[in-house]
Image (cartoon, grey):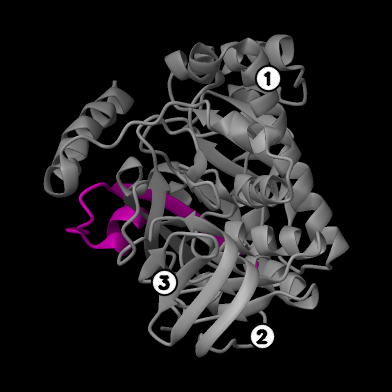
Amino acid sequence: MPHVRSYYAATAHASPGHPAVGGDAAFDVCVVGAGITGCAAALELAERGFKVALVEAERVGWGASGRSGGQAIFGFGTDMGRIAAQVGPAVARRLWDVSIESLDWVRDRVARHGIDCDLQWGHLHAATKPRQRDDLLDLQRELAETYGYDSPRFLERDGVEALLATTRYCAGLFDPRSGHLHPLNYTLGLAQAATAAGVHVFEYSPVTRIERGDPLRLVTPGGTITARHAVLTRGGYVAGLHVPANWRVMPVGTYVVATEPLGEERITALVRENVAVADVNFVLDYFRRSADHRLLFGGRVSYSGIDARDTGRATGARMLRVFPQLAGVRLDYVWGGYVDITMSRAPDFGRIAPNLFYLQGFSGHGIAMGGMAGRLAAEAIAGQAERFDLFGRLHHLPFPGGRWLRTPALVLAMLWFRLRDLL
């Protein structure tokens, strides 16, 4: 299946196709899923001398990694206070440091492998109401005093309006170390780097069954792969492979639009520096400039898996709440996809068996943490599991309701958070 029609697919660099699995083959490690996390894991493993297969059900970057808002942000999908309450302040600090290293991992790999993905630095968390302004001030203090992270700069309304031509936001927290990029070109670049390092990439090869043992046996429609270790990189697309970690993540639909090219002068008048922006509502809006002077704007979520309204119209209406001066501007691209969330919004990394690892639940933070997750899995397989096992201390519960009722239960819960956004 080709990549979903999107601005990213339309501006993707040419990349080689890869064969499907055919017959039987043996590797040291099999990585399942060729998004950011899978490509990073395969690359890190190959650099450590392992013989690696990277197996993808569709195409490299087909899922969330090639469709997202493209924002590389510090931290996790939940606040650090909740993490510290589970694991204690010392472990929380180490987890935080991993999240910051994830930003450095992006910077380093883009430079090291010459990945052309429009990488830009600078991200603004924006408050829409006074309560959120106070929360951002508290966050700035906590990051500096507890985690030694003093990069973010607090902006009052006038500071935000110096960056953005909108009156929607009353304050913001600007981080120069976070940023944004073209996620599909980034993923394709990681895959090319992995291939150059010796990774065997297979596309159109869904893994339908895993037979545990040593070695593991991974079954696809075209053949099987045996491996001493396997890494499941599980985003929002997990149909067909049932493993015990399934019910701790939920696929959530999110949507993005790309305007027609606005020209450098007009887009710079709207977003005066080339930074990414996200508000801090539970159901959030996020936006950034593209390399060819469009506005890329994401918002809305679908917890039911059903997009009952016209996506372009609804997301475009949210865009006009931020920038009413874009009334009448054409939307050239409208697309959606699934991100994987956990109940706690913290990432879920662990083992199903001693030699079967999984990485999932990035909860909107997969651009940066995806690469770092791949590194942690590679470290663990190479015999240095200390940092990987830190994430195993986080508590993850399955979504309530089982296979059939968990989605309706989540929809009801999210309605409460949506109402809270409006207060």
**SS category of the residue bearing label 3:** loop
Q: Quadrant of residue 401?
A: top left
Decide which of 224, 275 is in the foreground and name it: 224
Which residue is under mark 1? 93
The percent coordinates of residue 217 (x first, y second) are 47, 69
Range of residues picked out in magenta: 292-317
Asked if 207 appears above or below 257 in the picture, the reply is below
Residue at position x 42%, y 75% in the image: 219
The percent coordinates of residue 136 (x first, y second) are 56, 18
Q: Which mark, residue 391?
A: none
Q: Which mark, residue 14?
A: 2
Q: Is mark 3 in CB contact (under 8 Å) with mark 1?
A: no
Q: Nearer the viewer, mark 3 or mark 1?
A: 3
**Distance CA(mark 2)–CA(mark 3):** 26 Å
**Distance CA(mark 3)–CA(mark 1):** 36 Å
Q: Is residue 355 visible?
A: yes
Residue at position x 59%, y 86% in the image: 18
